[in-house]
Amino acid sequence: MTGRPIAVVTGGAGFIGSHMVDVLVERGFSVRAIDNLDGGREENLAPHRNNPDLVLEKRDIRSCSPDDRLFRDARYVFHFAGIGDIVPSIE
């Protein structure tokens, strides 16, 4: 990553999260996307595949703590991670 401001996007490989990644990279941010790829897809981030300003961390957000290295020095955190189907969400 470069010296740009840092933003974290949870669910960054999902439909909404990946669009947020697009906007943030376009606006000059280094982005740390966190996604366990249960609902997200790496191909949603394909336009940034060789961009040093995007790091995709393939892990479940539930394994992260507030002091996790992924959040260090982040200016913004955008939370889009979640289970997309209501039934598994309440079980």
Image (cartoon, grey):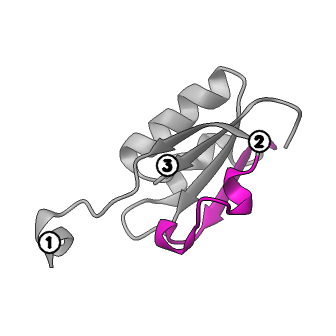
Q: Secondary structure at mark 2?
A: loop
- What residue is at 18 percent from the left and 74 percent from the top? 88
Which residue lies under the disc numbered 2?
51
Observer-nearest of 20 and 46: 20
Q: Position of residue 59 (x, y in %)?
A: 56, 71
Viewer-side label of 1, 3: 1
Q: Secondary structure at mark 1?
A: helix
Mark number, residue 90: 1
Query: Residues under labels 1 and 3: Cα distance?
Result: 27 Å
Q: Is residue 10 left or right of residue 85?
A: right
Q: Secondary structure at mark 3?
A: helix
Kind of residue sitting beneath label 3: Asn
N-terminal of the two: label 1 or label 2? 2
Tell me if residue 66 comes above or below residue 36 in the rendering.
above
Viewer-side label of 1, 2: 1
Which residue lies under the disc numbered 3?
44
Kind of residue sitting beneath label 2: Asn
Residue 40 occupies which quadrant of the picture?
Answer: bottom left
- What residue is at 69 percent from the left and 57 percent from the top? 70
Residue 53 occupies which quadrant of the picture?
Answer: top right
Q: Is 65 inside the magenta-drawn segment?
A: yes
Query: Residues under labels 3 and 2: Cα distance?
Result: 14 Å
N-terminal of the two: label 1 or label 3? 3
Query: Residues under labels 1 and 2: Cα distance?
Result: 37 Å
Q: Which residues are magenta?
A: 51-72
Crowding at mark 2 (Cα within 10 Å: few <14, some 14-19, many 20+)? few
